[in-house]
Image: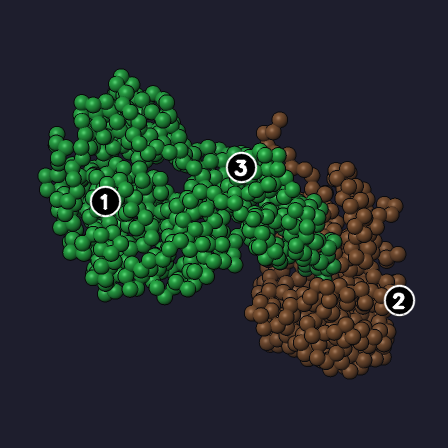
Chain colours: A green, B brown
Amino acid sequence: MPGLEQFRNFSIVAHVDHGKSTLADRILELTGAVDPREMRAQYLDSMDLERERGITIKAQNVRLRWADHVLHLIDTPGHVDFGYEVSRSLAACEGALLLVDASQGIEAQTLANCYLALEHDLTIVAALNKIDLPAAEPDRVAGEIEHVLGIPADEILRISAKTGAGVSELLDALVARIPPPKGDADAPLQALIFDSVYDAYRGVVSSVRVFNGTLGSGARLRYVQAKATHDAEEIGVRLPANTPVAALGPGEVGYLIAGIKDVGQARVGETVTTAAQPGEALEGYRDPKPMVFCGLYPVDGDEYAELREALEKLRLNDSSFTYEPETSGALGFGFRCGFLGLLHMEIVRERLEREYDLSLVATAPNVEYQLELVDGSIEIVDNPSAMPTPNEIANIEEPYVTVTVLTPTEYIGPIMELCQQRRGEMARMEYLSEERVELVYQLPLAEIVMDFFDQLKSRTRGYASLDYEPAGYRASKLSKVDVLLNNVPVDAFSTIVHRDKAYDYGRRMTEKLRELIPRQLFDVPIQAAVGGRIIARETVKAKRKDVIAKCYGGDVTRKRKLLERQKEGKKRMKQIGRVEVPQEAFVAALTLDD
Amino acid sequence: MLPRPDRSGVYVHIPFCAARCDYCDFATWTDRGHLVDAYVDACARDLRQRDLAPVDTVFFGGGTPSLLAASQLTSILDVIPRASDAEVTVECNPDSVDVEKLRAYAAAGVNRLSFGVQSMRPHVLVALGRTHDPDNVARAVDAARAAGIDRYNVDLIYGTPGETVDDWAATLDAALALDPGHVSAYALTVEAGTPLGKAVSAGERAAPDDDDQAEKYELADDCLTATGRPWYEVSNWARPGEECRHNLLYWRGGDYTAVGCAGHGHTAGRRWWNVRTPERYVEAITTGRSAEAGEETLDPRARVAEATMLGLRTAAGIKLPVSGADPLRVDACLADLSAAGLLECGGDRAVLTRRGRLLGNEVATRLMAALDRPTVRAGTR
């Protein structure tokens, strides 16, 4: 068994598209971990969604051998929504490999994760990737990294994960520069769970890093935060195939199966110790906290039970989203769900539709508000339609985030304009190099969840990158805008916006609905209202004619089928008061655009 | 009171035209002149083989039946056994008739004509892709009278983009000046695949506007009712006794045999249709095979849906109560439709109001939904 000084534990910190998965593939090949005949692209990204989107959602780890050393590569999720998961993956390492595209430069999230690594006292080994591309500017990018992170430019490696150039030198540098882990094999067990996935056959499979003590197969284990006891059924390492071992000692990374049926019982950040000789909980555990909320409803009301079952199953795999039943007058029975962020929301929704074959309507995403009511009580509201009336509210606070944008200097103007429109306050601006600048803003999270990413991308032709972190709550002048259809409020369309934007939102929503709602037998007023005051109004004029002009001998069968299709279409309409609204109108109205 | 129901009819499809109108989606061709003789022979042979009992109505439709030589058309009519008071209608293009031709028709038993007029305004005719000169219409009507055929219909189209309400009023006035006993007025409908349909979906031409068409429908209904031609079907108005008995067969679920390509028949509870092209029709008949291309035998549910859809189109409406339906659901639906001003229920019949005629699809689909028996899910309770 190798000694502690032979281990090297590291994560790769990189932006989407900077070549992390390709580099992981090259490393697997070079170290002989994967037979070239079994190699496939993005080997470590196991979920279809991960491969399609080119992102890593779940942390993976693999044990490698290089130059008489044992390397544990921990692949981390790269997205801002999963900041906490990243922090736990980093906590399992002594070093981080910073990988930057030599033609693009460092991106906001990469920088944020790098700072996070530095906070955890990780040693950073920086490498520029894609040096084989004609557009690569390694000198400029190296200068930028030196400027922002203080890593000397001459220590930054230059590689091409695609061709393999420089990758073995990179592995040598990882071994040479990253310190070996420390730990006491005789101390009480302290192992950190940095990822858990649910397997239909084995139950929960957790990725663990042992800090002190020994995690032995068959041991009676104590899960400190979950306050539960489980037996270690199987302990192993990933080579990358799961390979059982008798025990994992200090500094080692591997997997643990303990007959657990729900990932909520083995959360990221959990400390595992032994029941016989319990150790202290490791620092940094945190319950996942949803930041973004939306209602999820089956398009077909009959699928409510299937949706509930799918949510239950998906939660076995992802304990970081929340759901509870809610009823909407417009959409029927569904669930109010909470997510870590927008991408997380999209992923959960897409997995529900794809893996459980459901067709869903999602209401517009919103954040959680803290209300102080006139009677002095405090209320938390995560659903706009549940907002009390204005005269009951003394004060509303909304979540703010600190947003960091890295951009080529030519886009500073458009970004400042966007942030201003979104109620942003600039905190600082710093030039990383002559061409690139870092902008830091304080922004309401609600403005980010609208369509901030899309706007940022389109205004900067995709060159700007974004990271944000929670920055507490602030009092804001907010209004709930209700939408009334034929004088009946439609809860699914209620939204909370800044008072200055209520009129604009109301106008856009009523105009959009006027286009989407088919004409009825009577005039249908569509109104937007704030606290009972109408701020915008449109009318869907009554339908005057729909009859088929001709119906003779040759038309009968065709026309009957046409009417039967129309009849079936009517059955799928949602009835709001007396108004029939096709399901598609809800979907289209709730699809945000500008 | 509508005429008493007839028992049976024959529809003969003549798929030849001199030019194709932009809105037309019927089975018709402008380049098959060489097929006409063989086609006429095939129709006659088809009819002889059927050995029909005498029919009450005959209708030559198209296409442009009047494009045939009189002898060709009458050679088909001659082999159709008819009751002594049978109604025999021929659709005519005002451009392709003269007194001589119409006299030959009359001698063979034709006693009703239907003129495709569409509009009396030249710019509207251009927009429809029609070629005829409005003055030809008056000449054609004079020829019909001279030939002794005094029952005639004029076909009109309203709501063509570019047609003003005044244009439509002028068309109605000019049509009424011809003193027709019967008028059919159709809202211009854009059909996929037609030159008009392609131009509309390409954004090159405007689509007809429902509100404009509703206004013009009401204008036509006022005008025709006031001149003694009340509606008897959504798009048809006639002096009492001048209704088209053949078309009433369609709306009353009567029996009719179809001859010619793309013709649709309904006999003994079965709907069937012939091959679409004249070539294939001629080939099938001359080789002694059936020209049928498809058929549908209606189940009771479809039959009720059909009777509802067709009956509602007529001034006789539908008969109540509807057998086999849940009376509570149907009554609730009828009450809603009456309250909305779409339907008038009196005695044992329900008839569309004028507003209901314009919203006929809404009424029909709601009634059809109410007539559906609630589906019982397998395995519940």
- Amino acid type at circle 2 is Ala
Labelled pair 2, 3 in contact (Cβ < 8 Å): no
Q: Which residue is located at x 83 percent, y 80 percent?
A: B142
In front: mark 1 or mark 3? 3
- Residue drawn at 39 percent across, 45 percent down: A469
Identify the secondary structure beneath mark 3: strand
Of residues B15 and B176, the one nearer the viewer is: B176
Q: Residue under mark 2: which chain is it in?
A: B
**Is A186 situated above or below B233?**
above
Q: Distance between the residues labelled 2 and 3?
A: 68 Å
Seen in the image, is A78 located left or right of residue A581?
A: left
Kindly identify the amino acid type of the residue bearing the numbered disc 3.
Answer: Ile
Picture quadrant of residue A47? top left
Position of residue B245 measured from the top left corner of the image (x, y, whole percent): 81, 61
Mark 1 → mark 2, Cα distance in angstroms: 91 Å
Mark carried by residue B226:
2
Residue designated by label 1: A96
